[in-house]
């Protein structure tokens, strides 16, 4: 029912909920929120070890944390969590398959990333994040046509999303379309929701500016990324 005039607003989601929302919807998450999510799911799984969905969330959080920090120390734990999700979760488990694909991309094992990503797409053809992780796999394999097909599908399933704009910018940059890439990432940063997401796109914009030889502009992007999220280590 609609809230009455005197009702209190609903409580804001906590750090673990914020990170879970980010991890499961394909956007960058803040490092403190990721740590809270990992602690929350580890505690939950000690009491409920057969919760396959939570194993998938935990594995994806490990992957995102390692990607954000450029530290692969948690890769074995991520793989164990995601494979446990495959054993204990539903028969069709696109989130775990997608997590394994993202882990393989982070490890630069692109053939494995393609295998897991295509399995995720087969399990859930309309899950845009499954197609998104395939962009990384196909890019690593040098499959330009595969990248194009995956990007087209992502843009069809999730039009107007800031995260999709950032993906498109990365693809355009690889194709040498630097002006188009810069426009896309600028729009993504403007449309981003959480500070960690906006900072990630500002850092991406800074790298593009640096590659164009615009060092002062790159520095401004990196500084703004750090003002937005001091844990944006790539900008540091």
Image (tube, rainbow, N blue to C red):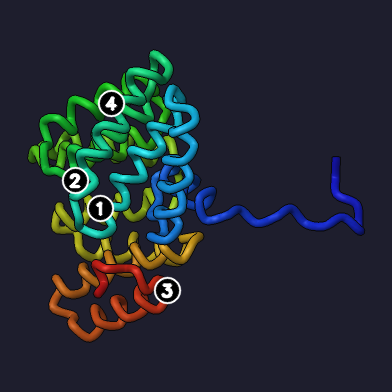
Q: Disc 3 designates what residue?
A: 228
**Percent coordinates x, y for residue 9 in the rendering:** 77, 57
Mark on residue 67?
1
Above or below 168: residue 45: above
For marks 4 and 3, the one nearer the N-term is: 4
Q: Are marks 2 and 1 in contact (CB under 8 Å)?
A: yes
State the residue in front, 27 or 91: 91
Where residue 41 sits, quadrant-wise, is: top left
For marks 2 and 1, the one nearer the N-term is: 1
Q: Residue at x 13, y 39 (%)?
A: 144
**Percent coordinates x, y for residue 123 in the rendering:** 36, 19
C-alpha distance separating marks 2 and 1? 7 Å
**Residue farthest toward the front in the current orientation of the protein:** 47
Secondary structure state at the residue bearing disc 4: helix
Where residue 58 sits, quadrant-wise, is: top left
| Callout count | 4
Q: Residue at x 41, y 45 (%)?
A: 23
Mark on residue 94?
none
- Callout 2 crowding tier (Cα within 10 Å): few <14, some 14–19, many ≥20: many
For marks 4 and 1, the one nearer the N-term is: 1
Above or below 183: residue 162: above
For marks 3 and 2, the one nearer the N-term is: 2
Q: Quadrant of the N terminus?
A: top right
C-alpha distance separating marks 4 and 2? 17 Å
State the residue in front, 179 or 22: 22
- Callout 3 crowding tier (Cα within 10 Å): few <14, some 14–19, many ≥20: some
Q: Disc 4 designates what residue?
A: 83
Q: Are marks 4 and 1 in contact (CB under 8 Å)?
A: no
Q: Are marks 4 and 3 in contact (CB under 8 Å)?
A: no
- Callout 4 crowding tier (Cα within 10 Å): few <14, some 14–19, many ≥20: many
């Amino acid at each position: 029912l609609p809230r009455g005039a005197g009702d209190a607003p609903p409580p804001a989601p906590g750090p673990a909920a914020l990170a879970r929302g980010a991890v499961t919807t394909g956007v960058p998450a803040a490092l403190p929120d990721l740590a809270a999510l990992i602690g929350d799911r580890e505690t939950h799984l000690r009491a409920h070890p057969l919760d396959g969905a939570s194993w998938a969330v935990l594995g994806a959080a490990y992957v995102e944390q390692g990607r954000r920090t450029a530290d692969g120390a948690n890769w074995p734990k991520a793989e164990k969590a995601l494979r446990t999700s495959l054993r204990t979760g539903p028969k069709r488990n696109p989130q775990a398959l997608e997590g394994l694909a993202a882990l393989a991309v982070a490890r630069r094992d692109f053939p494995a990333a393609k295998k897991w990503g295509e399995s995720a797409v087969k399990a859930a053809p309309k899950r845009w994040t499954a197609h998104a992780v395939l962009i990384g796999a196909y890019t690593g394999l040098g499959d330009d046509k595969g990248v194009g097909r995956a990007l087209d599908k992502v843009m069809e399933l999730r039009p107007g999303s800031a995260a999709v704009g950032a993906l498109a910018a990365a693809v355009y940059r690889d194709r040498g379309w630097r002006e188009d890439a810069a426009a896309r990432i600028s729009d993504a940063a403007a449309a981003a929701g959480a500070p960690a997401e906006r900072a990630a796109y500002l850092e991406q914009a800074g790298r593009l500016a640096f590659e164009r030889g615009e060092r002062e502009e790159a520095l401004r992007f990196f500084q703004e990324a750090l003002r937005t999220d001091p844990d944006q280590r790539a900008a540091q």
